[in-house]
Image (cartoon, helix red, strand yellow):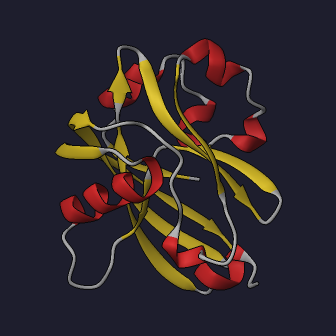
Amino acid sequence: MKPTKEVFGNKLRIRACGLCYREESLLLVKHDIDGEILWAPPGGGVEFGESIENSIIREFKEECNLEVIPDQFLFFTEYLSHPLHSIELFYNIKSYKGELSIGYDPEINDRKIILEVDFLNQKQINLIPDRQLHAILKSCINPIHLLDNRGHFKY
């Protein structure tokens, strides 16, 4: 069983992520990454030859069992903490259908890293310790305001 940092580390990783809402609640995935919890919007690595939109569609199906239609590109983030380096492209999700359920991460198929998937509102997000939140959520006053973000954010 390889540690997550060994699987994804020491290379630049392009991730496609989606912001999916039900009213003012944002869909988040709770990951167990080598014993550390991280709540983040669904998303993952873009495979060679795969479009960003198709990557988002695949990731939502794998992680949450939802069929989605990606909409417009919103913003991107850069995460750099050796050995991890990723560029994350965030898109608005136009619509979704299906029965929300806990999925899997095929890149780490020897253990379950997805613990929970749910739509969380700001009060629920505020109950999660900052160290367990994706960087885009740490200074967020309301998750719906993420739709207003444009540009490049470094974390």
Task: Tell me the quarter of the picture where residue 6 sits.
Answer: bottom right
Q: Please state the total of marks drawn on the protein image.
A: 0
Question: Looking at this rendering, what residue extends furthest in the front direction?
Answer: 99
Picture quarter containing residue 53? bottom left
Determine whether 9 is above or below 56 in the image.
below
Residue at image point 45% right, 28% down: 26
Lateral position of residue 16 relative to residue 13, left or right = left
Position of residue 77 in the picture relative to residue 91 (left or right): right
Placement of the N terminus among the 4 image quadrants: bottom right
Left or right side of 146 for 119: right
Q: Residue at x 39, y 48 (%)?
A: 65
Residue occupying image coordinates x 74% and y 35%? 130
**Percent x, y of residue 120:** 54, 23
Give 146 or 115, whichever is nearer the viewer: 115
Q: Position of residue 66 (x, y in %)?
A: 33, 44
State the residue in front, 22 or 52: 22
Location of residue 104 in the rendering, given as x and y in whole percent from the top left corner: 53, 61
Q: Is residue 73 visible?
A: no
Q: Is residue 108 left or right of residue 147?
A: right
Residue 60 position, x and y percent, is 36, 52
